[in-house]
Image (spheres, rainbow, N blue to C red):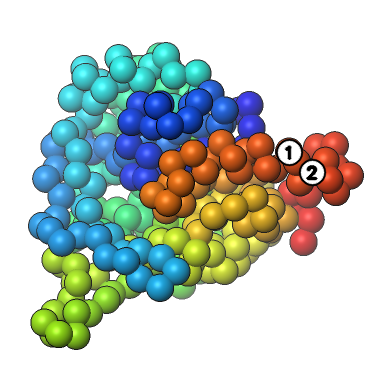
Amino acid sequence: MKNPVMTASGTFGYGVEFADLMDLSDIGGIIVKGTTLMPREGNDYPRMAETAQGMLNCVGLQNKGVDYFCKNIYPAIKDIQTNVIVNVSGSSIEDYVACAAAVDALDNIPAIELNISCPNVKQGGMAFGVTTEGAASVVKAVRDVYHKTLIVKLSPNVTSIADIARAVEDSGADAVSLINTVMGMAIDIVRRRPKLSIATGGLSGPAIKPVAVRCVWQVAHAVNIPIIGLGGIMNTEDAIEFFMAGASAIEIGTANFIDPAISAKIAKGINQWLDAHGYKFLSEIIGAV
């Protein structure tokens, strides 16, 4: 990667939507929206709600399926001058395997991010990501068919995220990304109903940053593979916290909704911060805490 800044799945479309707003080559990577084996309509509306210092969503992995992605989306994004990574999810191990195998055949996709932690669907991700056995089973199965860089995205909605991280490392993960959203809920007190169609959803934004930093710090002491940190990163200083906690790279998520060019600004800001504090290399501050 040319720099350690990527965009988080579900917050940056397929990248091309932002091409008029920033130079996509200024960042280290784009993780495209969640892709599943078969098309998904997602959850009913409303499926987003603003909260204090964050937002809730229950989009539910809406996408047109991996075949559509390979035939129609991939040709439009394969020549973007940065790493384009596909976020892969499924409702069964077989779905994960088939989807990962299809993406494996695409020359210009160097990695996948395996979503075993999505809290927005009633079947699939959450069932695998909350136990060491479940996480290990899907990672092992995907590792058998996927031959490039395998990143596994972890959920904070577990008893011990360090145990889950160790399990996926032992099962063949090349890196882990954390955290996915935190389960939350908001209520419309006038209508006396949840603000989201399925009642609960994933909380993202600045509100979850302390949770994310804690998780990265714990996992950094548990595994030997690289960690990608995400969760509430809004500016350069937030990013530096994640590096010092042990992350080697970061993803920008909810902040993209506020400033579409924020990822490029943070990439530049990291260099400026390192220069201002007398560091020659980012590696000097990774895990410094």
Q: Disc 1 marks which amino acid? A: Asn
Tell me if 10 is positioned left or right of 167 in this view. Answer: left
Q: Disc 2 marks which amino acid? A: Leu
Q: Residue under label 2, please give it.
A: 274
Q: Residue furthest right?
A: 278
Instruction: State the SS at label 2.
Output: helix
Circle 1 packing at 10 Å, graded few (<14), some (14-19), many (20+), is: some
Report if residue 13 is visible in the image.
Answer: yes
Q: For the residues marked 2 and 1, what is the alpha-carbon distance in whole angstroms?
A: 5 Å
Circle 2 packing at 10 Å, graded few (<14), some (14-19), many (20+), is: some
Q: Quadrant of the C terminus?
A: bottom right
- Residue 271 is tagged as 1
The answer to whether residue 252 is above or below residue 210 is: above
Tell me if 277 is positioned left or right of 221 in this view. Answer: right
Residue drawn at (45%, 61%), measured in percent from left and top?
A: 205
Foreground residue among 75 and 38: 75
Q: Residue 35: where, in percent of width, then height?
A: 27, 37
Q: Residue 220: where, in percent of width, then height?
A: 65, 56
Foreground residue among 226 and 98: 226
Q: Quadrant of the N terminus?
A: top right
Residue drawn at (57%, 69%), measured in percent from left and top?
A: 210
> Would you identify the image quadrant in which residue 278 lies?
top right
Residue drawn at (39%, 49%), measured in percent from left and top?
A: 257
Contact (Cβ within 8 Å) of mark 2 with mark 1: yes
Foreground residue among 255 and 121: 255
Residue drawn at (43%, 41%), measured in percent from left and top?
A: 260
